[in-house]
Amino acid sequence: MPINLQMPALSPTMEEGTLAKWLVKEGDSVSSGDLLAEIETDKATMEFEAIDEGVIAKILVSEGTENVKVGAVIAIIAEEGEDVGDAKAAPVAKAENAAKPAPEKEEPAPAPAPAPKASPAPAAKAAEDSGNDRLKISPLARRLAEQKAVDLSAVSGSGPGGRIIKADIDAAEGGSAPVKTKAAAPAPSAAPAAKAAPANEFDIPHTSEKLSGMRKTIARRLTEAKQTIPHIYLTVDIQLDKLLKLRGELNKSLEPRGIKLSVNDLLIKALAVSLMQVPKCNVSIEGDQLKKFERADISVAVSIEGGLITPIIKSADSKSLSAISTEMKDLADRAKAGKLKMHEYQGGTASISNMGMFGIKNFDAVINPPQAMIMAIGAGQKRPHVIDDSLQIATIMSATGSFDHRAIDGADGAQLMKAFKELCENPLGMLA
């Protein structure tokens, strides 16, 4: 009996994916565990393994197809010689808004209401009234007009309601009064002003590209985090000179093994140990439940093409620095190649994000839900620093913890920052 091979859900947030590449072709025999295809998810490019054995009878979704819904049939596996008939691919995606059918019979549109007649302009009405007792003119203006022999029929009033006032008579005597004409028809109402063009419609050279699944997921999760998590930020300055000295000594001893510790490796270890020392910060809030974790799994932010991913160093509190360094290098390399497996980036009890290599002094990181804290690491810089009551030059690094205030009180967050600072400034304590 033919077996439908469906688009798998390779991550908890995956709803659709791109079938990037087929690793088999029609007619190939496959067994359980064989690699069938490479699929781009919202997090990475992952390999899809066969569960059943048989022959690839028909490929229904060609490689490179985007927006393939989870559960859609992408291929059919059959036994040798089995006829699969005219199987067809399930639709990849449906239009969200189908066009509505036109009504069978259109009702005639109602006739437009006649436009109301415009009232004559005040000046025109004054002209109609000129030469009779209804002429609008102030007593002073009438008296001046008689004294100066001004023809009132040629004068336009500039007073309220078209009333002729003294200034109009003075202007008429000087020859600068406006000539009285027949009232013009009211000007048609102005067309509505054109809507302001959106910023991206201005004549600015640009290119546009469709958001990747990863970028959409990042946008959605960070928006959700900032809107739903009350962040509290706590910053400490850390003297790094002892940590840098220890790193140099350890790297000399590890050189024969081909291992080179980075500063970030030591900071991962320091954060993990700090979380075990201050367990009130090694938590996660989910609904009305507060989860308290018994080990420190540190998610490490790694920048990759098109976004960011956070591979996890599990049990970082109990691993050696050499083990953390080796594992972190492998995870970072595979993250950049899009080869991480789901369990390698899903989970974690806290995160660390280091932007020191870009010269960033300090920054506030956004919490990675459902975690309750993230440590933002700035650059280590030579700064004036008070040591033993004297001003000296030391290597100082700013670290900022972002805490979910629903799960972690400010005082507990402060204790974690204090423990992290002490371990970095006395790094032998994290090795004991």
Image (cartoon, rainbow, N blue to C red):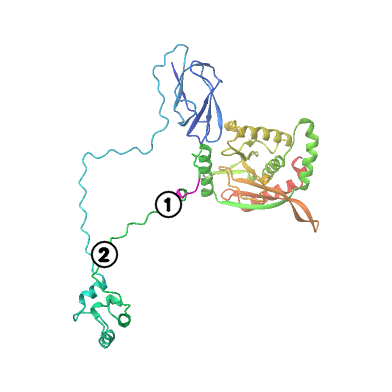
Kindly indicate the quadrant of the structure image that contains residue 252. top right
Residue pictured at 24% horizontal, 75% vertical: 126
Identify the residue shown where x is 49% and y is 31%. Answer: 18
Spot occupied by residue 401 in the image (x, y as percentages of width and height): 64, 49
Q: Position of residue 320 (x, y in %)?
A: 73, 35
Q: How many numbered discs sit on the rendered protein?
A: 2
Residue type highlighted by circle 2:
Pro
Q: Kindly indicate whether the residue at mark 2 contacts the one at mark 1 (C-beta within 8 angstroms).
A: no
Q: Residue furthest left?
A: 132
Magenta segment range? 201-205
Camera-side residue: 312 or 379? 379
Relative side of 189 to 300, left or right:
left
Residue at the (29%, 77%) spot, across then down: 160
Q: Which residue ends up furthest to the top in the rendered image?
A: 81
Quarter of the picture containing the C terminus is top right
Residue 186 disc label: 2
Which quarter of the picture shows residue 255? top right
Q: Nearer the viewer, residue 249 or 209?
A: 209
Question: Eyeballing the image, is 273 above or below 167?
Answer: above
| Residue 213 circle label | none
Q: Is residue 27 magenta?
A: no
**Circle 1 residue:** 197
- The answer to whether 57 is drawn above or below residue 345 in the figure is above
Foreground residue, 81 or 322?
81
Q: Nearer the viewer, residue 411 or 54?
A: 54
> Which amino acid, by three-letter code, is at mark 1?
Ala
Q: Is residue 400 above or below residue 166?
A: above
| Looking at the image, residue 206 lies above or below residue 329 | below
Left or right of 168 in this view: 347: right
Magenta: main secondary structure: loop
Q: Secondary structure at mark 2?
A: loop
Left or right side of 199 for 397: right
